[in-house]
Image (tube, rainbow, N blue to C red):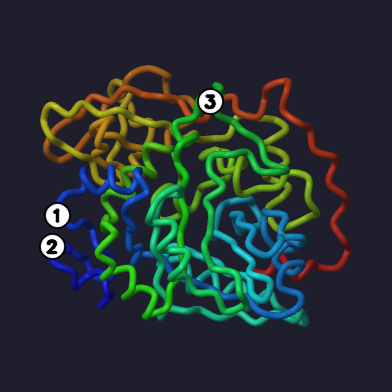
């Protein structure tokens, strides 16, 4: 039980506090920078050892070999076919590299990382005793969370979400100058028990639940492992190339698929934002089918009620799904959905996409990084 889940008004589902009485008000408090949101569905992994950054660089999608102390980024672990297996927020504090992962993915990610160590000077540790809180930059919540954050090497373990900025080596598939995530200044802090208790009881802070945090994430078109990833996902489909993939770094598992789809275009699926008809007060569950006429063209991955936009959702659609309005099917009835295209069907096939250099031949001996 967390320090936040026992607060008056907290409505918790296991370790996750869903809300503190009013998810809509909590969204506004988060955006003002006045609230912290306990993220009980996140788990922290620590990487120690002198080789941690160069080793992590060699096995993941992101360039982290020269990550400076206090610098944040995001990475993916792909399978040999380029499918997304694991996702992690990354922060180095000068002595350790900290990964923040969705709780259901943390143990599998840590297990895979441990198997990849071989002779490198790297130690992998999972820290279920540590708490994670989310907040927006620029307000009281940021000041309080940074002061309470874990800092074993003198640098607060506070991750700054790079979304939606296009990171060095990344590429934007969304077409258009305006991105709804431009104001999504999201940060997360790692706390020990004392730090979590201090934030939970601070009279100057407001608290927000997971429903509020998720609504703001969905409105920013921000993908998440626990929602948008399945066993077919590749980074191009969710515009994840912008924040979690370095297109010009050295070879890593799954890179050939990343390069091929990036160069030739036309990923098999694409993420879209849906503005749902709110007249019947229905909200689809994860996995609800999305229809174009009588044809199923995709599935809902995330849905929420936003304080300004009303009911919204993210969906993974077939590349051939039409660009117009769609319908979401629920057990209680169909919901009309206006579609906003995030990743176009021809993503990667436009003339201004940077072309990758030809991948070198595979070594004759098996590469241990291909182990799963």
Q: CA distance from mark 3 to mark 1?
A: 38 Å
Q: Position of residue 199 (x, y in %)?
A: 33, 68
Q: Position of residue 369 (x, y in %)?
A: 73, 67
Marks 3 and 1 close (CB-CB < 8 Å)? no
**Side of 6 where 61 appears, left or right:** right
Frontmost residue, 18 versus 251: 18
Residue position marked by numbered label 3 in the rendering: 344
**Side of 39 where 5 appears, left or right:** left
Q: CA distance from mark 1 to mark 2?
A: 6 Å
- Asked whether residue 372 appears in the rendered view, the answer is yes
Q: Is residue 187 above or below residue 176?
A: below
Q: Is residue 154 above or below residue 327?
A: below
Q: Quadrant of residue 130?
A: bottom left
At a point 67% along the width and 59% down the height, the residue shown is 60
**Side of 138 where 123 appears, left or right:** right
10 Å crowding of disc 1: few (<14), some (14-19), many (20+): some
At a point 26% along the width and 26% down the height, the residue shown is 327
The label on residue 21 is 1
At a point 59% along the width and 72% down the height, the residue shown is 112
Frontmost residue, 70 versus 306: 70
Q: CA distance from mark 3 to mark 2?
A: 43 Å
Kind of element beneath mark 2:
loop
Q: Quadrant of residue 58?
A: bottom right
Residue position marked by numbered label 2 in the rendering: 9
At a point 37% along the width and 17% down the height, the residue shown is 324
Marks 1 and 2 close (CB-CB < 8 Å)? yes
Q: Is residue 224 above or below residue 49?
A: above
Along the polypeptide, which appears first: circle 1 or circle 2?
2
Along the polypeptide, which appears first: circle 3 or circle 1?
1
10 Å crowding of disc 3: few (<14), some (14-19), many (20+): many
């Amino acid at each position: 039980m967390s320090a936040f889940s026992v607060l008056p008004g907290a409505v918790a589902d296991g370790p996750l506090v869903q809300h503190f009485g009013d998810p809509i008000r909590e969204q506004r408090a988060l955006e003002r920078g006045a609230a912290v949101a306990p993220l009980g569905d996140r788990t922290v992994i620590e990487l120690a050892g002198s080789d941690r950054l160069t080793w992590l660089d060699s096995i993941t999608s992101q360039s982290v070999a020269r990550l400076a102390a206090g610098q944040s980024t995001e990475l993916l672990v792909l399978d040999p076919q380029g499918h997304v297996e694991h996702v992690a927020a990354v922060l180095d504090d000068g002595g350790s590299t900290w990964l923040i992962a969705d709780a259901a993915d943390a143990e599998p990610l840590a297990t895979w990382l441990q198997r990849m160590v071989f002779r490198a000077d790297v130690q992998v540790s999972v820290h279920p005793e540590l708490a994670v809180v989310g907040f927006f930059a620029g307000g009281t919540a940021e000041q309080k969370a940074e002061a309470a954050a874990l800092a074993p090497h003198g640098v607060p373990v506070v991750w700054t979400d790079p979304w939606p900025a296009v990171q060095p080596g990344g590429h934007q598939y969304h077409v258009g100058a305006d991105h709804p995530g431009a104001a999504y200044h999201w940060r997360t802090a790692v706390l020990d028990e004392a730090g979590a208790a201090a934030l939970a009881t601070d009279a100057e802070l407001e608290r927000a639940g997971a429903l509020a945090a998720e609504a703001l994430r969905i409105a920013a078109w921000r993908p998440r492992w626990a929602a948008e990833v399945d066993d077919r996902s590749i980074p191009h489909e969710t515009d994840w190339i912008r924040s979690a993939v370095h297109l010009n770094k050295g070879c890593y598992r799954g890179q050939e698929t990343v390069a091929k789809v990036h160069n030739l275009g036309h990923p098999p699926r694409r993420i879209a934002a849906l503005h749902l008809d709110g007249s019947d007060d229905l909200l689809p569950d994860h996995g609800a089918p999305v229809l174009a006429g009588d044809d199923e063209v995709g599935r809902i991955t995330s849905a929420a009620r936003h304080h300004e936009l009303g009911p919204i959702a993210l969906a993974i659609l077939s590349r051939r799904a039409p660009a117009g309005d769609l319908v979401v099917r629920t057990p209680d009835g169909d919901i009309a959905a206006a579609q906003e295209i995030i990743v176009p069907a021809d993503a990667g096939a436009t003339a201004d996409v940077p072309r990758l250099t030809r991948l070198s031949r595979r070594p004759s001996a098996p590469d241990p990084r291909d182990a799963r």
